[in-house]
Image (cartoon, helix red, strand yellow):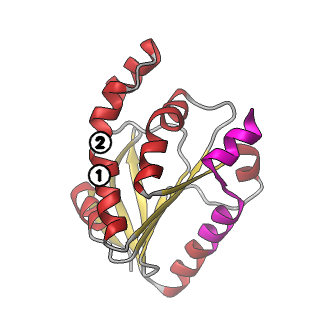
Amino acid sequence: MAEQLDRAGFQALVSGFERSAWRLEIQGWYDEPDEGELLAQWLADGDPGPTLVWFADWPAWIAEQVCAGRRFERVRVLTDPLTDYLRWQLDVITEPAIEAGEDIRVLPAATAATLELGPSDFYVFDDRAVAVLDFDDGQVTGARLLDEPAELAAFHAIRARAWDHALRLGEYRRVET
């Protein structure tokens, strides 16, 4: 049976994994606290500085996880054309996270359309639990935590399809230019 988590419960789950956390991001836009102003500023003047100051905690946290022997991976499904939000992610915050040790890969829209990825963002934690994210106007409000073997198998299959077809950022940039 699925356990419903509020935002705080979901965030505790993200910070408490033991070995691995893997995320599928399929939204073309997210409206997380503080991001809107930073995105607007970057669109207006192209200066990544304010975003990088705000974002600095994430790469530091990722580096801690990597040093402790934990993996954090994600596949980001892209839109065609890219939304402003995805351009901001790819141009400003993705590389610092990768440099800190997060394995972020991208899945072009045309490729994603050929795969059965389902309608929802989700995390796989330690291969034992899946958190299907709940959103309200682009903001994560919580998640449904699943741990039944049949449910896990379905999400593990989606993870395998996405991972097998996703490109590393450098490879994507070479293909797209």
Q: Nearer the viewer, residue 135 or 37?
A: 37
Q: Is residue 53 magenta?
A: no
Circle 1 — which element? helix
141 in relation to 9, above or below:
above
Identity, as a three-letter code, of the amino acid under mark 1: Ala
x and y percent of residue 88 in the render? 49, 31
Drawn side of residue 80 relative to residue 56, left or right: right
Q: Nearer the viewer, residue 8 or 177?
A: 177
Q: Residue at x 77, y 55 (%)?
A: 114
The residue at which mark 2 appears reads as 56
Q: Residue at x 37, y 18 (%)?
A: 41
Q: Which residues are magenta?
A: 157-177
Q: Nearer the viewer, residue 103 or 15?
A: 103
Q: Residue furthest top?
A: 44
The residue at which mark 1 appears reads as 60
Drawn side of residue 120 relative to residue 69, left or right: right
Drawn side of residue 117 relative to residue 152, left or right: right
Image-quadrant location for residue 110: top right
